[in-house]
Image (cartoon, rainbow, N blue to C red):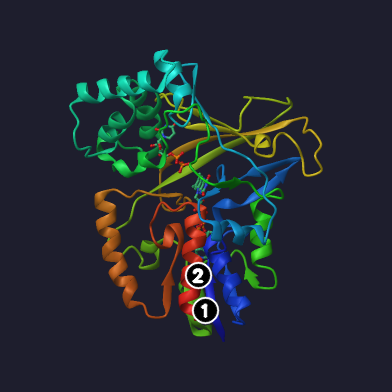
């Protein structure tokens, strides 16, 4: 009998499993994919550490979480500063004085604030009701149209007027010359990749890959062997989508190795117009400053184009679509989840929440504390 069977070896599952094993519990981790790590999985392609399921930059203001991850892996001091390509012109992100200068030629915070204020007033928005109104209130119409509208519609497959304002609130707006994408005290990327971090968390714990817990035969066998289940797969899938399907966005990555040292001069370049169909190109080597683990310059490069799409059965669900319809359906699934005494639902898919890595760790530690007390 296992004290806990953990479904999913992503960050939530790995942190929970680690804490439970450290508390002396007998733990088994099941993973549907052929490898551990969920979406933060990284793998070497030649000398380049590739973020297989999209670029991941660890950032947090939570010292407890930062100290926690340091116990398992050394982090570099990578600072995320993507640039946006709109019709061939380059703009700094997030929205800051460099962006305002490139857009309007303004050079002081006062001039930038006046420009934003004027565009907000022209739009007549007092209480933003959706992503479009929120974006125009924050940065004005010019920046909304060049840097937000096309990107967001590609990313979410919906008009900005149909999306919640909260999505755009993830990005800082600053009247300073500061291209750091995150307002975070701590930021970096594990020097040996995220898979190494997960391996360390799962050290000494039984893990079975290529096992789908929701396969009825597997589920029957596993439920019989577990006192409790920690489930980090999609919430609606657990209930066979009995109340209807929650919507997700999926991604398709087109990855290629190029025999040149420098493709785009930055780790992340966003394409913010409605064309091309991809949202961003990642050049993975710049997450480690163009060097391998021994500090040698990497001579070639690997890039990934990221194409968003509506999730269909069989795709990986990457992003929950936290609009009103889905959030309402999600709360009905949560009522069902509350009745499952033996099962705890966690993580981005299990809670249907647009969680960053630090929030996932904080939540997994909280759940572990409650269950292991
Ligand atoms: P997951 O990583 O999705 O893990 C769930 C695991 O459960 C998966 O391995 C899955 O295969 C497995 N599973 C599902 N169903 C079953 C089943 N039936 N049986 C067995 N196994 C199952 N966060 C940041 O902080 N910084 C970033 O820069 C950042 N960038 C991101 C970029 C992209 C493109 C995406 C999609 C997310 C990004 N995130 C970022 C968020 C980050 O990926 C998540 O916070 C984190 O990975 C969530 O971990 P998790 O364990 O909840 O989910
Ligand atoms: N966004 C945008 N233009 C950009 C980058 C982001 O409009 O160049 C918007 C878009 O709606 C996106 C949201 O800001 O979904 C949050 O961006 P973030 O980079 O946090 O997205 P993630 O890394 O989670 O995909």
Q: Give the Cα distance between marks 2 and 1.
A: 8 Å
Residue 16 on image: x %, y %: 54, 69
Q: Within the image, what quadrant is residue 296 found in?
A: top right
Q: Earlier along the polypeptide chain: callout 2 or callout 1? A: 2
Of residue 143 and residue 257, the one placed in the foreground of this image is 143
Q: Is 49 placed left or right of 320 in the picture?
A: right
Q: Is residue 124 visible?
A: yes
Residue 71 on image: x %, y %: 67, 62
Residue 147 on image: x %, y %: 40, 26
Is residue 105 depicted above or below 361 in this figure? above
Q: Tag on residue 278?
A: none
| Residue at 65% from the left image edge and 42% from the top image edge | 77
Q: Are marks 2 and 1 in contact (CB under 8 Å)?
A: yes
Of residue 309 and residue 106, the one placed in the foreground of this image is 106
Q: Does ligand 1 reach within 8 Å of label 2's beta carbon?
A: yes
Is residue 106 depicted above or below 355 in this figure? above
| Residue at 29% from the left image edge and 41% from the top image edge | 165
| Residue at 28% from the left image edge and 33% from the top image edge | 132
Give the class, few, some or many, for how many residues have Cα within 10 Å of label 2's Cα (few <14, many ≥20).
Answer: many
Of residue 14 and residue 29, the one placed in the foreground of this image is 14
* Residue wearing tag 1: 222
Q: Is 99 placed left or right of 73 in the picture?
A: left
* Kind of element beneath mark 2: loop
């Amino acid at each position: 009998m296992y004290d806990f069977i953990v479904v999913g070896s992503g960050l939530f599952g790995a942190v929970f499993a680690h804490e439970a094993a450290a508390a002396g519990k007998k733990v088994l981790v099941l993973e549907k994919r052929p490898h551990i790590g969920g979406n933060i999985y990284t793998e070497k392609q030649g000398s380049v550490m590739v973020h297989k399921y999209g670029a991941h930059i660890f950032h947090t203001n939570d010292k407890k979480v930062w100290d926690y991850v340091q116990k398992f892996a050394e982090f570099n001091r990578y600072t995320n500063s993507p640039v946006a390509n709109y019709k061939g012109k380059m703009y700094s992100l997030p929205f800051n004085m460099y962006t305002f200068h490139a857009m309007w030629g303004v050079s002081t915070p006062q001039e930038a604030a006046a420009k934003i204020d004027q565009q907000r007033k022209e739009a007549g928005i007092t209480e933003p009701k959706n992503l479009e109104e929120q974006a125009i209130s924050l940065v004005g119409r010019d920046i909304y149209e060049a840097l937000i509208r096309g990107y967001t519609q590609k990313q979410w497959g919906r008009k900005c007027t149909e999306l919640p304002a909260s999505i755009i609130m993830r990005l800082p707006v600053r009247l300073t010359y500061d291209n750091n994408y995150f307002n975070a005290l701590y930021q970096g990327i594990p020097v040996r990749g995220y898979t190494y971090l997960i391996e360390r968390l799962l050290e000494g714990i039984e893990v079975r890959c290529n096992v789908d817990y929701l396969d009825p035969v597997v589920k029957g066998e596993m439920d019989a062997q577990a006192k409790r289940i920690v489930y980090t797969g999609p919430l609606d899938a657990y209930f066979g989508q009995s109340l209807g399907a929650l919507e997700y966005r999926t991604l398709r990555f087109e990855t290629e190795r190029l025999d040149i040292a420098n493709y785009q001069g930055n780790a992340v370049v966003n394409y913010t117009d409605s064309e091309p169909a991809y949202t961003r190109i990642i050049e993975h080597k710049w997450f480690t400053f163009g060097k391998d683990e021994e500090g040698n310059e990497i001579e070639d490069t690997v890039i990934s184009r990221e194409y968003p799409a509506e999730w269909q059965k069989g795709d990986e669900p990457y992003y929950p679509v936290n609009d009103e319809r889905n959030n309402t359906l999600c709360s009905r699934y949560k009522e069902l989840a509350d009745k499952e005494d033996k099962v705890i639902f966690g993580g981005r898919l299990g809670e249907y929440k647009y969680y960053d890595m630090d929030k996932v760790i904080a939540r997994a530690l909280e759940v572990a504390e409650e269950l292991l007390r």
